[in-house]
Amino acid sequence: MSSAYDYLQQNAALILGDIKRLVQAQSPSLNKEATDLCGEVLQSIVAERLGVAAEVCHQEILGNHLSFNVGNGPLLTSILGHFDTVWDIDEIPMIEKDGKLYGPGVLDMKAGLVQSIWAVRALQQTGGLAAHSIRFICPSDEELSSPSSRQWIEQQASGSSRVLVAEPAVAETYEAKIARKGSGRFEVHITGRAAHAGNNPEEGISAVLEMAHQILYLQSLGAPEIGTTINIGVAKGGGKLNVVADHAQLGVDLRVTNLAEGLRVEAAIKACVPHLAGAKVEVTGGMTRPPMEQTPQNLALFKQAQQAVKRLGIDLKGKSVGGGSDGNFTSALGIATLDGLGATGLGIHARHEHIIIADIPLRAALIAEIILGEDGPQG
């Protein structure tokens, strides 16, 4: 067994303590003050465990983004992990029970971030970091589709030989994530003309009726057989039962497995035209994340990782998943990217979100061994 794993097992209680510290620093994506305080806790953990300070990318509205550089070897590996969560302050508690740690963002993805920090510490302490440089890229707005951090992430990842994403492993099977769908968000704004529903309905143009036509059109653009799905998650319009509605709005979520499909559907959504004479349709939004496809670079990194983690007795499997992450951005740049290397557990974005405590040292060691590579020291 690897010396890094031995070290991580010996420090399991400290790793769990750091995870709890970061989870207790609650960080809703839209709460800049809380998210920045969480970022300060993250900086403290990194300073204590790795001895480096953050480079802070200040933001006016959302939380500040953080990066950390460790080591000076020729092989640069970036580790990508966000510290914002979908949970409002005190919406769910942190509880340790039956070998599991529950709490806001514990699985998505604070535990994975802390495990990565300790993976690098283990390499520092066991002499495995000499040939490597590590860059931690820690944005604060991933749960919002990274509106302020995408360009910064791409700049930070530039020059990396590979990017390891500490998002949670696939639920229940604990596979790595070797492909992710790309996503788009759109709003369709519909304008009609109000009129009295009893006295002169013919003078009105129903935005709600136009909305119904647009829903049918939008749904027709999907191609689920190749992974292209469209979800109308928001549909609202009108105001009073006796008034022909003069306004309506749709919120549209798009998921695609390849860039060509994203471009096709994005163009079709933006080409929406009114069905009713006199109605107006305006579309805003677009693709927010490119897909993380199974590129030759990504598949080569996955195969290397499979070989590396055999030293831990792990038979690493891979799976394509529907949700996106910031790894989509680095993959689209042509940088070898492997996702789903973080914590094990269940309940992403659910009230029962939790991690498996006993798996913490092994999952941290998994990242350490992937950094060392398939030709690393044998146990």
Image: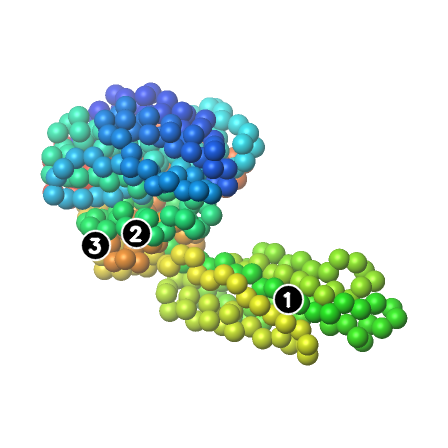
Q: CA distance from mark 1 to mark 2?
A: 35 Å
Res. 14 in view: yes
Give the alpha-carbon distance from disc 3 to disc 1, as whole Å: 47 Å
- Picture coordinates of residue 200, whole percent (x, y): 85, 73
- Residue nearer the viewer, 320 or 62: 62
Q: Which residue sits at x=36%, y=25%?
A: 18
From this viewpoint, which residue is outermost toward the front? 60
The N terminus sits in image quarter: top left
Q: Position of residue 159 (x, y in %)?
A: 20, 50
Q: Which residue is mark 3?
A: 300
Position in image of residue 320 (x %, y %) = 37, 54
Q: Earlier in the sequence, mark 3 or mark 2?
A: 2
Q: Which residue is mark 2?
A: 154
Q: Nearer the viewer, residue 357 or 65?
A: 65
Task: Identify the mark at residue 41; answer none if there is no mark.
Answer: none
- In the image, taking residue 229 as reference, residue 300 lies left or right, namely left
Residue 118 appearing in the image = no
Q: Residue at x 79, y 75 (%)?
A: 203
Mark 3 or mark 1, earlier in chain: 1
Query: Disc 3 versus disc 2: distance between alpha carbons?
Result: 21 Å
